[in-house]
Image (tube, rainbow, N blue to C red):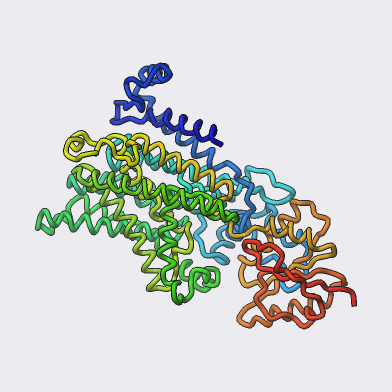
Amino acid sequence: MRVLFQGAFYFCRKIISLLPAYATHFLPLADANSGSQHKHWHNWQARLPPFWVHPLLNLMWLLIGIGLRLANLTAKPPWTDEFSTLVFSLGNTFLSVPLDQAIAPDILLQPLQPNPAASIGDVIHNLVTQDTHPPLYFVLAYLWMKLFPSEGGLVSLFAARSLPALIGAASIPCAYVLGRVAFRSPLVGHLAAAIMAVSPYGIFLAQEARHYSLAALWVTTSLTCLVIATRHIQNRTPLPIWVAVSWVAINALGLATHYFFTLTLCTEAVVLIFLAWLQLQTSSKFSLLFSPPWRRIYAVAIGTFVAGLIWLPIFLENRNRSNLTEWIQGSRVGLDWFSPIFQALGTLITMISLLPVESPQLLVMILSGLVMLIFFIWAVPILVRGIKIQLQQPESRIMIQVLAGVAISAIALFFIFTYFLGIDLTRGARYNFVYFPAVIVLLGASLAVCWHPPKELIGKEQGIKETGRWGINGKKAVMLIWLMGFVSAVTVFCNLGYQKYYRPDLFVQLIQQISPVPVLIATTQKTHVHIGEMMGVAREFKLANSPLNPLFLLAHQDQDPNTSTIALENTLKKLPRPFDLWLVNFHAPVAETVKTCVMFDTQSLPRVNGYEYKLYRCHES
């Protein structure tokens, strides 16, 4: 392990030593007297044409990002939201799954079978009538998954997850463009791309068969248009038509990918209002708000609004399916009022660092938490100082304000939804895609100061040249922060951080160990989320080629929980004994027939994420 980290640190030094201080100059990592062991490296660096430096570095960040996002891609079992993506992207529907009767695994898994007769129209129709998301990503996934063969008759999990992984990797060069355009600095762009490549939060989004990595990509590109517009507002020049048209198109695509992209648009509106206020402070002429740059920004706003109106009827119809989002709704008592604050802070932290704090081993969890605490005690002052120095620079101040305004406005909107509207958006870490790229570029801007402090400030403040603490200088600080991100990325793809909510693989192993007789697995069903829970179990049985071949019961439940009880009662009467009854996430009164079975003591059995279970042994009469 020590050799691994030494190798990673040396690799990090070599890669970052290519980072340009300016567009055409290089800053070598080592000192002039660093020794002969670096001579050949620097000779190669000196011979490299300046034109190739930025493309090669971007290629390097991209390859690192792709490697991290594809690593262990199918090792973790899919969870309920991913099953929704798989089913709807195939043009299938959950409505074909029989309810209130015992069914075999193959019947339960039928919606996961590729359907040659399904069309893009089926994908869109099933999604807008049965789910709560716009269809763009699912249409792309439909086209993408057709390129891959099935696995055992089921859709390929690699196919489903590789699309968001590659889209997530595409955010890396986009982060470079955003950082370079915003600060007119290749160094900021490369540092933003480097952090994006290894961000544990970015890895988390990219390794799920969901649409969040695509939505984050639209956020990055939309923010790029925002910073371009900011420059034109500053210079009081017209926004180029191609930028305005691109901005509208990107916003339309963002809305067609995820409705929460609207939150990003709200943050951009807040920033533009702030810029208008700043401009009015420098000139009392109200007519400035109708100058050429503002007129085209108004046109962009109108175009985006029209694009959003297309989805308004569908969004209003989705309100009738609020049971799909009831998990982020509910009341709070006592200390629960503080939970959203810590949830928001936790997600923000994981954009740069995440060690195995979710480990089942207490010692690993404590050590990981301690290392992260020490890391942030060391890193936060460095990052804050970098932002403060950037704020002192006239050419970078406005961009720090714009990107920080996006991030702060988004977090404020999350808390408004949570505390005033009763919708706790902080519970879903993935929803933070609405400001994630802004945080990454802010980190890049701060680290650029660590790497190369502005010359005019070096003599004004004691210690500015050495921005690190505990003897770690600025360049080493950049390497250490990046290395922490790299280790955190490994933590995520090894399922030691951002762990899956559901572990059907462990649950199936438990059933196989405990049940020597036929098995009935029963659950209450309200939405296709609960069908997805059982699909995960059935898929693991199929992959394991288990001879057990259990039956499944999806006991439908509306307002009256007794309907599930009746369905369970009727099913148990039809099954020959002996069999084991596993009640999994079964939220209804126990049927009378169940009382004739012997309840197994499950207290000594391990807990399984996502599956709360009880076991009854139903012997022959």
Q: Which of the 4 image quadrants contains residue 181?
A: top left
Q: Using the image, determine if residue 590 lies above or below residue 370.
A: below
Judged left or right of residue 457, residue 193 is: right
Q: Quadrant of the N terminus?
A: top right
Judged left or right of residue 589, residue 241 is: left
* Residue 91 in sight from this viewpoint: no
Judged left or right of residue 43, residue 320 is: right
Q: Nearer the viewer, residue 608 or 244?
A: 608
Q: Nearer the viewer, residue 75 or 112?
A: 75
* Residue 340 in sight from this viewpoint: yes
Q: Residue furthest left?
A: 284
Q: Residue furthest right?
A: 621
Measuring from the top left, give residue 509's x and y in whole percent.
74, 56
Q: Which of the 4 image quadrants contains residue 361?
A: bottom right
Q: Quadrant of the C terminus?
A: bottom right
Measuring from the top left, give residue 619's x and y in whole percent.
86, 73
**Residue at 21% over, 54% down:** 275
Measuring from the top left, give residue 179's x and y in whole percent.
33, 41
Judged left or right of residue 369, residue 531 is: right
**Residue at 37% over, 38% down:** 478
Q: Nearer the viewer, residue 88 or 182?
A: 182
**Residue at 75% over, 54% down:** 542
Measuring from the top left, give residue 191's x and y in whole percent.
37, 38
Tell me how many marks there are.
0
